[in-house]
Image (cartoon, rainbow, N blue to C red):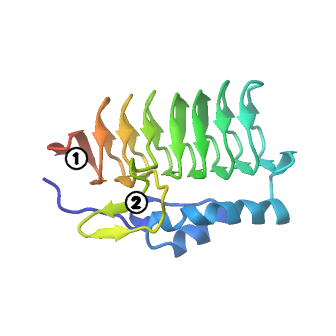
Amino acid sequence: MFVNKKILTKELFDCDIPFLKEVFDNATYPWEILPQIKEVVAKALKEGLPGYHLLENGILVGENVSVAKTATILPPAIIGSGTEIRPGAYLRGNVIVGENCVLGNSSELKNCILLYHAQAPHYNYVGDSILGNHAHMGAGSICSNLRSDGKNIVIHADKDHETGIRKVGAFIADHAEIGCGAVLNPGTIIGKNTQVYPLVSVRGIVPENSIYKDKDNIVDKR
């Protein structure tokens, strides 16, 4: 069983998005970023971003962004260059998407960040969450962001971390792969280069460079 549970922002994400880099650098833990998303988007809309233009009021997009006619983007939102938003995608506000991402059919996103090349392409829910560079969510996998009792989310690592936040989804680190139909329970952290099997319910911290088969079967990927 792994004991090295990396949960620091710098251990999970390498953020090269210029207007987000300072936010990531200053956040010890990734859940500290979630309450700042609204402010970051508002500042970008007010001051503008190099290489971005208004798609419509409250929605900034980079170059060569593809938005399907049946996709819905509710402001505020920032969509990076080269990103593809496919039919039926639903962005519910306070969404920041990096360059060359894919948001797909019936995927729903709110108050979240996707770094470069992240993908939520088929029937995914990404709420109050962060997807790292090249992170990929298999069809039907979701980031659950609310406890059934409605209490604030606690991150269970080597010690318990009180987030003080009622809605916290998942933090999927760079190059992590989530299998089809997997459920990431509130406050789950998936380490870098880790693979999660399909149809599993994941809770807590999954170490980097590992394969998560179930809670009692996590193997070294290297």
Work out whether residue 160 or residue 23 is closer to the camera in this orientation and state it: 160
Q: What is the number of callouts on the image?
A: 2
Q: Residue 10: name its quadrant.
A: bottom left
Residue 148 in the image, given as x and y percentages of width and height: 39, 47
Q: Residue at x 60, y 52 (%)?
A: 111
Q: Image quadrant of residue 195?
A: top left
Q: Position of residue 157 (x, y in %)?
A: 27, 63
> Which of the numbered marks, if any, corresponds to residue 152?
none
Q: Which residue is pictured at 39% across the width and 52% down the height?
A: 149
Question: Is residue 153 in view from this perspective?
Answer: yes
Q: Which residue is mark 1?
A: 222
Instruction: Inspect this view and state whether residue 49 appears.
Output: no
Instruction: Classify 1 as above or below 176.
Output: below
Q: Judge whether 110 appears above or below 20 on screen.
A: above
Q: Residue at x 34, y 62 (%)?
A: 155
Instruction: Find residue 6 and report its horizontal and vertical position in percent.
Output: 31, 63
Horizontal relation, residue 83 to residue 49: left or right: left
Position of residue 13 in the picture relative to residue 19 (left or right) = left
- Give the spatial CA distance, label 2 vs label 1: 32 Å
Crowd around label 1: few <14 · some 14–19 · many ≥20 (10 Å): few
Which dot marks residue 153?
Answer: 2
Of mark 2 and mark 1, the one earlier in the sequence is: 2
Q: Residue at x 45, y 28 (%)?
A: 140
Q: Secondary structure at mark 2?
A: loop
For marks 2 and 1, give the one nearer the viewer.
2
- Residue 132: x percent and y percent? 49, 51
Residue 95 vs 37, above or below: the answer is above
